[in-house]
Amino acid sequence: MKKTTIILLLVIQIVLLFIFQNIQSLFKEIEEVDITKIRNPYKFTEDIKRIRKIFSTLAIAMGLLVIGTGFYLVILYKKSRTKPEHDAIPPLQDYLLELKGSEAQLKNLVEEQRLHVTTKEELNKSIINNINSAVIFINQGGRIDIFNTVAEQLFSQSFANARNSFPAKILSGFPEIVEFVQTHEGEKISKEIASNEQIFFVDLNPIENIGQLLLIKDITEEKKREEIQRQNSNFIMLGEMAAFLAHEIKNSLGVIYGYTKTIKGDMEKTGKVNREVNFLTAMMESFLSFSKPVRVDIEETIDLVDLFKRIAAERDIEIEVDSDRGEAAVSVNSDPALIRSVFSNLLLNSREAGANRVVVTFKTFKKDKTKNLEIILKDNGRGIDDKIREKIWYPFFTTKEKGTGMGLAIIRKIITTLNGEISLEGTGPQGTTFKIIFYK
């Protein structure tokens, strides 16, 4: 502010100096005019000289003042250049330094908050993706915002494709689930839904003023295991109830068989009686064997490929092996006698159904962080009638002229004891397919 005032004053002085010099020059010119033409030349000349001297003195004084002011301004300017800026205006500089410090603190705080939010987002994303159910969040606009990894796998859709899409589009292959979500929008409800040959547990949770959270879990395998366990429980109860009856029938058959040996006369008729007695005795022995718990005596590493090839040679049936392990051996730790009994009976059933070729496929898969083994057996036999496909697991059920009907019931019981499951996957004129899973 001080410099500006001095500069303005200097400009005014220079202007005044210029005016005084011009006035002085004007009066000098007047002095040189022909004064003889003036009425009182002497008095006029003296006045002009006096005025010119005044303005000349003023011009000199103003010139000196301009020089002095100029020197003062130069000195002031040099002083301001040599002094540090913060000395010139210390309060403002302190304020600026404080402001810069506050800005740095604010930046650090913002960065910390950003990192905190990012960490929380990553944590939430990790938690959502590690849930073993499909997690789908539907916003208030009815579009998908969250679509976790399990949902991607379950519905064969990527997150990029699902995001901002309507559930009806992404879940179009599962119309029962779509209908459930649309019907119960805004409700808190859970239900088991069968869709696309699968069973799902669907949990719908509304979140106020935000949207809906949809949790979907594939429980198809769990339901199959529950059904197998239910059937096994029924078989155990049936076995316990019938074991006593079978034992008594067997004893009575022994008595009948003994008496027929002593009967003389029609040997053909007594022979028929003896054959029927022997058949009934064999059935009772099979049933008693089935009613007893399966004992796992030893556990060894069994090469399944080699086992299938040996059994196929014994049954005179061609076998083709396919494995996701390539040429590597496929093995399982189990009781060799029980494993051989299972696959020997399955190949025997295929042979008796007219099959001359069986394709065995081995697949490994992870579930609950453990590796499990899946075995698919597909033959080219006559197949099984759809009307009886649920009955084939029942004891004593058979379509053969000679047979006790205990084969598949015993096979399922053995596999269940070995922590596995067996199911009929498909059947028809082209053959029958069984799936066996051994869980570790």
Image (cartoon, grey):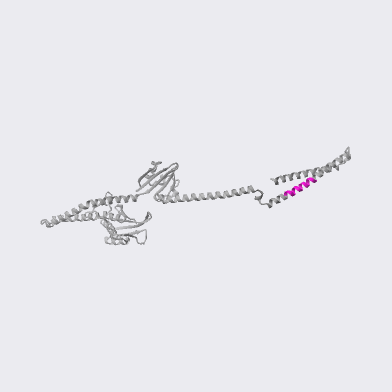
Q: Position of residue 425 (x, y in %)?
A: 31, 52
Task: Look at 65% across and 50% down and name the residue there.
Answer: 86
Tell me: 119 left or right of 357.
right
Task: Look at 48% across and 51% down and name the residue there.
Answer: 119
Task: Look at 62% across and 49% down and name the residue there.
Answer: 94
Tell me: 370 left or right of 68.
left
Magenta stretch bounds: 60-73
Residue 30 inside the magenta-drawn segment: no
The quarter of the displayed image where residue 321 is located:
bottom left
Task: Look at 86% across and 39% down and name the residue there.
Answer: 44
Q: Position of residue 340 (x, y in %)?
A: 28, 59
- Quadrant holding the N terminus: top right
- Closer to the camera, 295 or 396? 295
Look at the picture and state if 154 lies above or below 37.
Answer: below
Tell me: 178 left or right of 273.
right
- Quadrant holding the C terminus: bottom left
**Residue at the far top in the pictured view:** 39
Q: Position of residue 271 (x, y in %)?
A: 14, 56
Residue 397 shows up from this direction: no
Residue 50 shows up from this direction: yes
Q: How many marks?
A: 0
Tell me: 379 left or right of 187.
left
